[in-house]
Amino acid sequence: MSILAKGAVAALIGLGGTALMAQGAEAKGPPYKIFLSMSYVGNDWQTESGNIVAAMAKFYSDKVEFATQVAGTNAQAQIQQINAMVQSGADAIVMFPISPTALNATIKAACAKGVKIFTYEAAVTEPCAYNLTIDEAEMGTKTAEWLVKEIGGKGNIVMVTGVPGTSTDTIRNQSAMKVFAQHPDVKIIATVNGMWSQATARSELSKVIATHPWSEINGVWAQVGCMAAAMMQDEAGIADKDKVPCTDEAFNGVRIQMLPASTEVEGASGAYRAMGLRAMSYGAPLYQGGLQLKRALELLENGKEPPHDAFVPLPIVTPENVKLCKGGSWQELADGCNTFTPKQVSNPAWFTEIYSAETPEIGFNAAVDGTPEQKK
């Protein structure tokens, strides 16, 4: 799964939605009408992030009237839904846009009517919108630098890229290649399209292993694929201590694998277990949509103006800072935990990046089912 940089073409992911709220007069005060506009139904990241937006709305239910719409892969459908939201009296729209440019005219028209537009993790180029994303170039650079250091500045690397043609994939790959090019003893012996899927990554890596056994591979730079690579090495009889270092997105599975092999992890089995894997896990934080809703409310209620284009910090977890959570409250996340037991999260492809100091309203349960933290 890809998460896009500011201005990049949005990754095609989404979650299920609800019907529009009944039409009414334009809100002049609380409760404010705030909508979530999604592109299409897809993967765990988008489902979780949508749950978090809903949790933030629930936390402020005395101030927010909330509803969700899902447009699918058709930009025209999202345009129509945005127009309907505006006509129904929306005060703000939190949006995961399907395109950085196709919605611009519609967004501009909405802004002209006083509707505040907040995007997250997939930006638009219309200046009136408030965009919030990670820096994909930073991701490509930092993961490549870490992997080069892990293999001692020399060795054979397999690259597992994302969905070809997307800006996110292009930016990440180009940034990583700039780093690798600075190290002449680092050799890229194979590059495969993993399509941001562990299953596809496994299939493509199997083809590589047919001609380059694991004994010839010193590291794997993957946008998605470490869990698959570790499982394949398990099946090949490679001991945990000898598994090659790898980079991956913020899946719970790879973070469990990064825990010291001696760690007792409730519910662990197979490759979904602690093995001391040398890995770097990064990801687009799930809290972005929730934070954008909170910022929209602050703008509507208090006139607090956020930046129009902003990056959130890129969260990075390595064996040095991986930490198992006991429950997953916001306070526990604030104290540094970033990984959940398989008993809590049966799906190893579940995304773990929930915490932000700016969003004490949301913790683990917000991502699971849209339940916010308790008000104090």
Image (cartoon, helix red, strand yellow):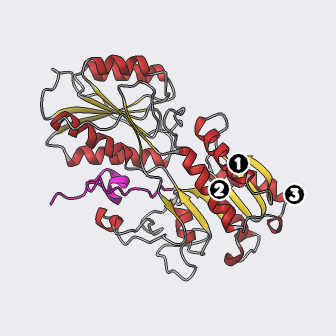
How would you classify the magenta stretch by its main secondary structure? Answer: loop
Image location (x, y in percent) of residue 218: 76, 65
Which residue is drawn at the image coordinates 37% and 55% (left, top)?
368
Give the residue pinned by disc 1.
177
Mark 1 or 3, nearer chain start: 1
Image location (x, y in percent) of residue 352: 45, 58
The image's mark for residue 211 is 3
Identify residue type, mark 2.
Answer: Ala
Which residue is drawn at the image coordinates 32% and 58% (left, top)?
363
Q: Pointer 2: residues within 10 angstroms few (<14), some, or many (20+)?
A: many
* Count of labels in the image: 3
Q: Quadrant of residue 37?
A: top left
Q: Which residues are magenta?
A: 350-376
Q: In the rendered image, which quarter contains the C terminus?
A: bottom left
Position of 54 compared to 209: left or right?
Answer: left
Mark 1 or 2, nearer chain start: 2
The mark lying in front, picked from 1 and 3, is 1
Q: Is residue 238 magenta?
A: no
Mark 3–mark 2 distance (CA, rounded to whole Å):
24 Å
Q: Is residue 374 magenta?
A: yes
The image's mark for residue 336 is none
Give the residue pinned by disc 2.
144
Which residue is drawn at the image coordinates 35% and 23% (left, top)?
82
Q: Secondary structure at mark 2?
A: helix
Above or below 194: residue 35 = above
